[in-house]
Image: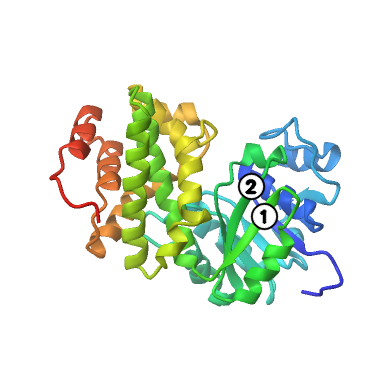
Amino acid sequence: MSQHRPARAAVLSAGSWGTAAAKILADAGGTVIVHARRGEIVDAINATHRNPAYFPDVELPASLTATADPAAALNGADYLVLSIPAQALRDSLAAWAPHIGPDTVIVSLMKGIEQDTGLRASEVIADMTGVSANRVAVLSGPNLAREIMAGQPAAATVACPDEAVARRFQQACHTTYFRPYTSTDVIGCELGGAIKNVIALATGIAHGMGLGDNATAMLLTRGLAETIRLATALGAHPATLAGLSGLGDLVATCTSPLSRNRTFGTHLGQGMTVAKATAATRQTTEGVKSAEALLALAHTHSVEMPITETISALLQQQVTLGQAADALMQRPAKPEH
């Protein structure tokens, strides 16, 4: 990418986090094209500089436009920024791959694990595009889209095996309100982002059941412990899980009412079925989709993940709410470390 022109980014798609990421990139001085499937969203963004489906009250920068044509979005793009449900990634990339330029860096914002394969998003990207790992980056951290759209302070980790690529994208998304840090630990960033969604379901359930802050703190802490166990078994650095994409994201997602995973869990804790909670939450809840795949990864690597195991069983209606709470509290006593 030339240092003498603004970064050009194609963002797929125009959901809440995609829109927020597009705004960050535009506010950082980039030229941004958002790809949206719905023509009325494209027209609204281009005509009114607003996304009526998610943030009708927030004006978007003039350097942010929209298109329904993926080839037009990707033409000359320095970055392809992917913000779609993890389970839709493979099919989306099958359509997009032919339009990805030879130097385009692909940035994943996804915080889920592919159900059938257990692959992380960066692995699916490599599988579907043939792009080398050095051209695939991950952006992850405590980033609630509504707060970012309001210009409230936030930070995140940009991870890529090639540190120079991570630094380039760091500059492309650094604004007065958004502070990115760099890392080379893609595995740690991706697993921190995926597992915290399952732990957020658990803290939401506890909240919905009327349990207090002690229960939330317990789930956060023991959730972090099982995150570190699985991530390090797969090659992550423990320090990554103490950072923004680990502990930081865990705290925000598990405690904020803006978190869709916590909200989904709250619905379950109040007695809703999975189907009713899905209808009430409306947006994609990655923890629901990824719990079983994460548990399968844990079993493959002989890692104990009791919270994830309990949430997975609850989602599959193998245990009741009361049985799930009992299962966590009645485990054998053991040393903390």
Amino acid type indicated by mark 2: Ala
The N terminus sits in image quarter:
bottom right
Amino acid type indicated by mark 1: Arg
Tell me if label 1 and label 2 are in contact, CB under 8 Å.
yes
Residue 84 or residue 258, whichever sits in front: 258
Image coordinates for residue 160, horizontal then vertical, percent: 56, 70
* Residue 154 tag number: 2
Q: Is residue 261 left or right of residue 41?
A: left
Asked whether residue 83 is in view, the answer is yes
Please tell me how crowded label 1 is: few (under 14), some (14-19), or many (20+) other residues with Cα within 10 Å.
some
Image quarter of residue 322: top left
Q: Residue 68, relative to residue 56: is it above or below?
A: below
Tag 2 or tag 1, which sits nearer the N-term? 2
Image coordinates for residue 136, horizontal then vertical, percent: 58, 69
- Circle 1 is placed at which residue position? 179
Q: Is residue 113 left or right of residue 166?
A: left
Q: Is residue 291 left or right of residue 3?
A: left
Image coordinates for residue 84, horizontal then vertical, percent: 56, 50
Image quarter of residue 328: top left
Residue located 27% across and 39% down the image:
316
